[in-house]
Each structure stands twice: as C-alpha cells, then as structure tokens.
Image (cartoon, coloured by chain):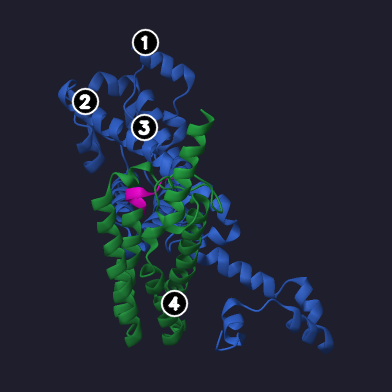
Chain colours: A green, B blue
Amino acid sequence: MKKKLALSLLLTASATAAIAGPIEEQIRFRQSAYSFLAWNTGKIKKEVVDHPETFNKDYVAAAANAIAAVANSGLGELYGEGTDQGIGWKQTRLKPEFFQKKTEVTQVANTFNQAANELAKVAATGDINLIKTQFGKVTESCKGCHDLIRIKE
Amino acid sequence: MKVTIHIWDLPHRLFHWLLAASVVAAYVTAKIGGALIDWHGRIGIFILGLLIFRIVWGFIGSTHSRFVTFFPTFSRLSAYLKGRWEGIGHNPLGALSVIALLATLAVQVGTGLFANDDIAFQGPFFDFIDKDLSDKLTSWHNSSLNVLLGLIGLHLAAIVYYRAAKKTNLVKPMLTGKKEIPVALAEAIDAGHGNRAGGVRFALSLFISSTVTWGAAGGITQLSKITRITSPCCSFAWASGEITQQHQATAPATRQQQIAQAPASF
C-alpha cells in the first residue's frame, strides 16, 4: 500500500515536473499571467475607450505588446494534467472539462493569440479607431476562453 | 354586453415595452461580449432608470399602475386562490410575478453597478469597493440571471396560457391600453372611476428617475470629486501657503501622474 502510494506520488510528481513545476506553481504562474493581462487591458480600455482624450500612442502600444508577449509565451504549458484542482494565489477556476475539450481549447486559445498579435500590430500604427475595434476582438476572445473552461463564480 | 375601459396608461405601457426591449438587449450584449459589454453597462443603467420610474409611478401613476391597487397581500392572494377575487388590473398571482420581476431586476442592476468581468469591464461603482466584493457581486449578478430567466419564462407562459385556455389576449391591452370587460364586472368594481395618468406626475417621475440614472452613469463619481476639493480639509489648507505646498506634496498623485514621473526606462 505504502509502496503504491509512493509510486503514484512519484509518477504524478515527475509527470508535472516535466511541464512547468508542481501543480500549485503552474496555477500560480497562470493566475499571475492573467492578472498582468488585466492590468494591460485596463490601460488600453482607459485610454482608447473610456477617455480617448488621454490617448497616448506609446503607452497603449506598450500595453498591447505586453498582451501579445503573454499570449505568445506558451501559456499552454501551465495547464498540465491535474491543474484543474489546486490553489495558486487562490483556488483555480479551471473546469475539469478542459482536458476533454482539447480541440475547442486550442481553437479559443488560437483566436486569442491572433487577436492579441493583431492588436500589437494595430497599436503600432497609433490609429485609435483601429485599436478600439481590435481591442474589442481581444476582449471577445478572452470571453471565449472564460465561457468554455472557466468556472463561473 | 362588454364595455371598453382604459386600464394601462401610456407611461406604464412605454415602461413595459422599453423594459422588455432593454432586457433582451442587455442579455444579447452580455452573451456576445467584446466591445458590446460597454453597451451592456449602458443598457443596465437605462434599466435602472426604468425601474426607478416604475417605482415612483407605482405611487403616483394612474389607478392600475399603483402598488396599493394590486399589491399581492395575503388576503388578496387567498381570495384569488379560492376563486373569489374580482378585479381588472393585475390579478394577485400576476401581481406576485410583477413584484418578483421588478425585485430580481433590481438585484441585477444593483449588483451590476459594482460588477466586473475580469477582462476590461467594470461597473460605474466598482471603484467604491474592493475586487473580492466586486467578484462576489458579479457572481450574484450571474446567478440571479437564472432567476430572472425563469420569471420571464413564467411571464410568457402565462400569456400563452391565457390566450389558449382562457381566450384572453393579455398583449393587446399592454399595446393599446384598452381592455374589454363585462359590463357587470365594470359596474361591480366601479371601473369608470380610475384616475388618469397626469402630465405633472409623469414629469415628476421622469425627473426623479433621470436624476438617479445620471448619478449612476457617472454623476456621483464627479460630484464626489467636487466635494473633495471644496471639503473643509482643503479650504483649511488653502488658508496658508506653506500648508498648501505640503498638502500638494503629500497628496496622492493620480495614476497618470505617477506614470509620467516613473523613469522612462522602467
């Protein structure tokens, strides 16, 4: 019995360690990534949508680049087996279905990546109307993931 | 013999159809999300205005709009369930549904004002509370939606039931304001003596509801800024130049200023 337990623990540990550290660490990293994203979407929202009179091209472009960088960082690595349960900064809200919906997950993740990269491109032009439209697409793609794999509180 | 009477006044009908359209629009914009979430917020504030209007109208509107006329008291409900209720406006069961719908919408609007979507949307009062509380209110906003959908389902089912089983069209009076009732019933409840809508009372309701709407739409936030500047603490500080300087130096810089002061390389 003890042997079995030790073996399964070892297997779990090695399986997750191969990806991005223990479960708690993966959850913590991804929660941090999304907080950082929220900080940057908030900045763009404020200067492009809520108070366009304060629009600063470089400030918005920096935020858009940060969003694209996070999107391109390979967040998928932080979704190892078993990470639907566990506490990072707080309890994860990942739905267990995540692991059965690989195709849909890939789709919503790609939509987000493309939207984020396009936003960085558009932000470089400094055209506030283009940025506003593309920003809407990015936030829509955030919702795509939330609706699919995030537990509603 | 039937007689046609005025039952729903024009403000009441306008309220009803604007509310129905707004709730549909709020639902659709929330489901689609993206840039439309801002419209969801605006529609929510409009619904707040409609609700306030309805509450005020429930006290000073015409007879069948008033809460006293139709409020589902226990005695009215039990009379209705025993088949002994006579009336022409909302029947007690319908009134229960009206009150439940208004209350649920009030919860939706109230929580929505403080809600956030964890993407880039925040209700106008989000800044007054901390994020954890906002998350909690957002979850109530989500779960009370199910209650609202259930009540709307009942509302529509009742319309179909009245149409099919009781051969009564409930929709037409809500469009035209007029309802045909048997003469005997009209005489029994003295239906001819309902008061009219009244322009002054309508203007008053409109004024109250638009003031509240303006407040929720950002007026309150702006007002609190004005009172902060003219508050006693600051006028005292202005009395002496030295204190003014200190005051400015210690006053928390706005976020924009902080960013402007931050080193460019960081």
Please tell me whether mark 1 or mark 3 is closer to you in this view: 1
Q: CA distance from mark 1 to mark 3?
A: 27 Å
Tell me the quarter of the picture where residue B260 sits. Answer: bottom right
Q: Residues within 10 Å of mark 2 (few under 14, many from 20)?
A: few
Q: CA distance from mark 2 to mark 1?
A: 19 Å
- Please give left or right for residue B54 compared with residue A114 in the image: right
The x, y position of residue B178, in whole percent, is 24, 37
Residue at mark 3: B193
Q: Can residue B260 be seen in this snapshot?
A: yes
Question: Farthest residue in the front direction?
Answer: A3
Amino acid at circle 1:
Lys
Cβ atoms at labels 2 and 1 below 8 Å apart? no
A42 vs A111, nearest the viewer? A111
Residue at mark 2: B162
Q: CA distance from mark 4 to mark 3?
A: 65 Å
Magenta residue span:
A146-152
Amino acid at circle 3:
His
Q: Chain of mark 1?
A: B
Labels 3 and 2 in the same subunit: yes
The x, y position of residue A74, in whole percent, is 37, 65
Q: Earlier in the sequence, mark 2 or mark 1?
A: 1
Q: Earlier in the sequence, mark 3 or mark 2?
A: 2
Residue at mark 4: A63
Amino acid at circle 2:
Tyr
In the image, which disc is placed on residue B82? 1
Q: Residues within 10 Å of mark 3 (few under 14, many from 20)?
A: few
Please tell me whether mark 2 or mark 4 is closer to you in this view: 4
